[in-house]
Amino acid sequence: MNITRRQFVFGAGASAAIMHLPVAKAALNNPQTIDLQAITGATQLLPEKYPKTPIWGYGGMAPGPTLRVRQGEKLVCNFINDLPQASTVHWHGIRIDNKMDGVPDLTQALVPSKGQFRYEFVAPDAGTFWYHPHNKTSEQMARGLYGALIVEEKSPPEVDQDEVLMIDDWRLGQSGQIDDSFGAMMDWSHGGRLGNWITVNGNARYQKPVKQNERLRLRLINTSNARIFSLLLNGLEGWVVALDGQPIETPFEESKPLDRLSLAPAQRIDLIVDVTAEEGTEGVLYMPGRNGDHTLAVFSVDGKARPAPLPTPKPLARNPIPEIDSAAQARKVFLHMEGGAMGQMRGAFLGGKRVGMRELVNAGKVWAFNGQVEMPEKPLISAARGETLHIEIKNDTSWPHAMHLHGFHFRKLAENGRFGPLRDTLLMDREETATIAFVADNPGKWLLHCHMLEHVSSGMMTWIEVA
Ligand code: C2O
Ligand code: CU
């Protein structure tokens, strides 16, 4: 094993606690009904000798309970807001009934502190999804409000273990408290709130016992406010089988090593990997770094499951998403992203009035779409149901952004006219231009925003309407 293990900021060795995510009890009836309470709590993010960190969490925990439903099954979720702030729940990546999308003022009213809201929806696609608040999101998620929503395939792939790995980036103070510098202009105008303590499922050193030649399904979810993770595996070999919940359609090449995995905020990667590390050693998921690697998860190998790894898995069955007909007439619309530090933006419309950069900074609004900060009154597009839409997005800023569209999965148009894999969140490099394409088959009002939460808080959002 040539991975050097380094602690992130706090020098002490993190305790090797094994964290089992609580799984909401799956009643074997349809619909499945659960209570989801958002409430303050405390969790041991730092090593034992440090105090617990006060958090806000679903069920008082961070992450919240992993919800599991079967594809096509209805989930009824009674959301109980026991936070000191108003909130909502957004079901990220679910092609949902618009009324259940959880966007305040656009799809529902805010759920006040001590209020409740009943979410009820069918998950049409199998895959790895998640849920999080959609009010003061940069603060509420940074405090620990998020959880996984797993929609099980009708015939899931054969694996020995199926693990959700929620990767978060906390900004903690010296006594382990969540740093409350929410709204710091430095974060908003630059790369967002980056933290100093990285956890997997709330653990700084996540550990999972495995056996050699076991097959694992690993569902990686980036729940951080703004950090883009670049990840590698050692002692675990296999395939990317889905992105943002949607299966990869290309057949898996035999024994192709997994490349570096790029995981932007809100993105998911499903892997199927075989444990190739020797007995008595460990497989690891790590962030390679110039000053040494940082280990996120350790899979300690004890025993052998079978003499050799299983044969190459079959791709996952595709979900019922309407295919983009490349011959069809597409509606084209342009989205110009501007602003932020080191940008060219001189001014923009704020609340119907064009104002200069200084006034924008004073209002805490430093990013614009098509010359407008915050939610525009009119949608970017009003589409007819079933129309094919192409949105050409130009990132005219000095920062990368993770563009997320609610209610749809889209494909990025490549230069050769081909389409990329289905995604709900697209990482865009500084100065990059990309066109996303999708069939607008889901009626309602849908948000399009940057998932770097300080960016959306300071202006980067618009919406589309499908009749
Ligand atoms: Cu996961 Cu509008 O967000
Ligand atoms: Cu952004």
Image (tube, helix red, strand yellow):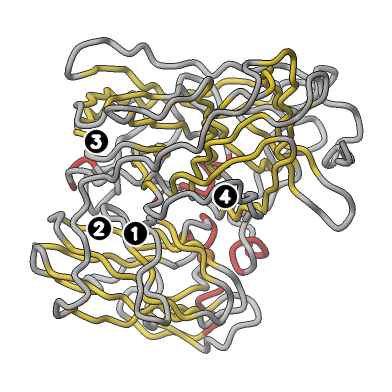
Image position of 112 with respect to 401: above or below: above
Circle nearer the N terminus (2, 1): 1
Q: Residue at x 37, y 74 (%)?
A: 413
Q: Secondary structure at mark 4?
A: loop
Query: What distance separates the C-alpha of mark 1 from that of mark 4?
Result: 17 Å
Circle nearer the N terminus (4, 2): 4
Circle nearer the N terminus (1, 4): 4
Image x and y of residue 456, in percent: 46, 61
Image x and y of residue 415, in percent: 42, 82
Circle nearer the N terminus (3, 4): 3
Query: What distance separates the C-alpha of mark 2 from that of mark 3?
Result: 17 Å
Q: Between residue 261 and residue 84, name the one nearer to us.
A: 261
Q: Residue at x 33, y 31 (%)?
A: 151
Q: Are marks 4 and 2 in contact (CB under 8 Å)?
A: no
Q: Are marks 2 and 1 in contact (CB under 8 Å)?
A: yes
Query: What distance separates the C-alpha of mark 1 from that of mark 3?
Result: 17 Å
Image position of 30 with respect to 124: above or below: above
Residue 350 vs residue 301: left or right? Answer: left
| Mark seen at residue 225 | 4
In the image, which is nearer the foreground, mark 3 or mark 4?
Answer: 3
Q: Residue at x 82, y 19 (%)?
A: 280
- Quarter of the image for residue 369 reads bottom left
Image position of 451 with respect to 176: above or below: below
Image x and y of residue 295, in percent: 77, 38
- Per the image, the residue denoted by label 3 is 123
Image position of 274 with respect to 253: above or below: above
Are there few (<14), some (14-19), or many (20+) residues within 10 Å of tag 4?
many
- Per the image, the residue denoted by label 1 is 405
